């Protein structure tokens, strides 16, 4: 009976982690959409949505701590709870990066964008998909999926390099674009960091299943 109750608690935690991940996916999309449309009200909403992520992180953390204190899990069960705690930390930081994007959007305001936003939304879309798939791997305990998702980080890195080269070219041709160009580079960097955090999740999933902690990329 105790074992069944613990298994149900683990499943509940997994579902809450997935819920937190869905909020992170949404906030990434909202932050970049606000930038693309220069929608300042949407950018402000990112701050409020991040508060929900922080609240859910605390709720999951408290539940995991109770499980560790009362159930004293061993081996695989202990790794599962520890993995959940690590994952919510990565998800919370992704939310912070989305807030950073929204902050820059508010700083840019309504001034004309120095170049069409094509690669930044593309990066965001890949990052969102990585979040979803990494958490699918967590719930399903799917090592192969975790490894595939981690490899997607290379595509994000490649796009970031393209953004870097494009913006440096724009700035070199017009020094007045330096301020906004630098801000757009920061946004690309924040999206790159989000992808890095999903790679962390994938590494923790592999650890959860195998007991082996290794860097994938």
Image (cartoon, rainbow, N blue to C red):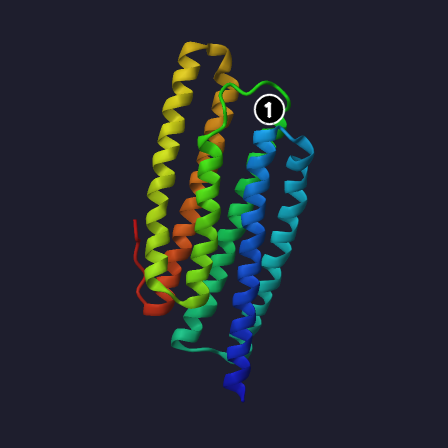
Q: Quadrant of residue 147?
A: bottom left
The quadrant in which the N terminus is found is: bottom right
In the rendered image, residue 121, in percent from the top left (x then y), is placed at: 49, 35
Decide: is 85 above or below 67.
above
Decide: is 97 above or below 21.
above
Residue at screen point 30% across, 65% down: 212
Residue at screen point 55% across, 46% down: 95
Decide: is 106 above or below 151.
above
Would you say 23 lies left or right of 177 here? right
Q: How many marks?
A: 1
Residue at screen point 63% across, 24% down: 109
Residue extending furthest toward the bottom = 1
Residue at screen point 59% across, 66% down: 62
Check disc 1 and report the residue beneath it.
Answer: 108
In the rendered image, residue 131, in percent from the top left (x then y), is placed at: 47, 52
Q: Quadrant of residue 126?
A: top left
Q: Secondary structure at mark 1?
A: helix
In the rendered image, residue 217, in percent from the top left (x then y), is placed at: 30, 48
Q: Quadrant of residue 96?
A: top right
Q: Residues within 10 Å of mark 1 (few under 14, many from 20)?
A: some
Which residue is more in the foreground, 150 or 67?
Answer: 150
Decide: is 125 above or below 89.
above
In the rendered image, residue 203, in percent from the top left (x then y), is placed at: 36, 57
């Amino acid at each position: 009976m105790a074992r069944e109750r613990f298994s149900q608690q683990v499943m509940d935690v997994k579902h809450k982690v997935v819920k937190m991940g869905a909020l992170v996916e949404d906030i990434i999309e909202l932050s970049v959409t606000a930038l693309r449309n220069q929608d300042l009200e949407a950018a402000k909403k990112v701050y409020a949505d991040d508060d929900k992520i922080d609240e859910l992180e605390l709720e999951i953390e408290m539940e995991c701590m109770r499980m560790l204190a009362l159930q004293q899990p061993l081996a695989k069960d202990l790794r599962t709870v520890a993995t959940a705690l690590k994952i919510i930390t990565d998800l919370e930081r992704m939310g912070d990066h989305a807030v950073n994007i929204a902050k820059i959007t508010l700083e840019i305001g309504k001034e004309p964008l120095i170049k069409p936003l094509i690669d930044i939304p593309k990066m965001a879309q890949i990052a969102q998909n990585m979040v979803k798939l990494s958490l699918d791997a967590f719930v399903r305990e799917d090592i192969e999926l975790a490894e595939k998702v981690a490899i997607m980080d290379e595509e994000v890195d490649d796009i970031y390099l393209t953004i870097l080269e494009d913006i440096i070219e724009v700035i070199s041709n017009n020094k007045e674009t330096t301020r906004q160009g630098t801000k757009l580079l920061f946004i690309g960097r924040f999206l790159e960091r989000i992808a890095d955090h999903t790679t962390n999740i994938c590494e923790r999933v592999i650890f959860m299943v195998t007991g082996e902690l290794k860097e994938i990329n």
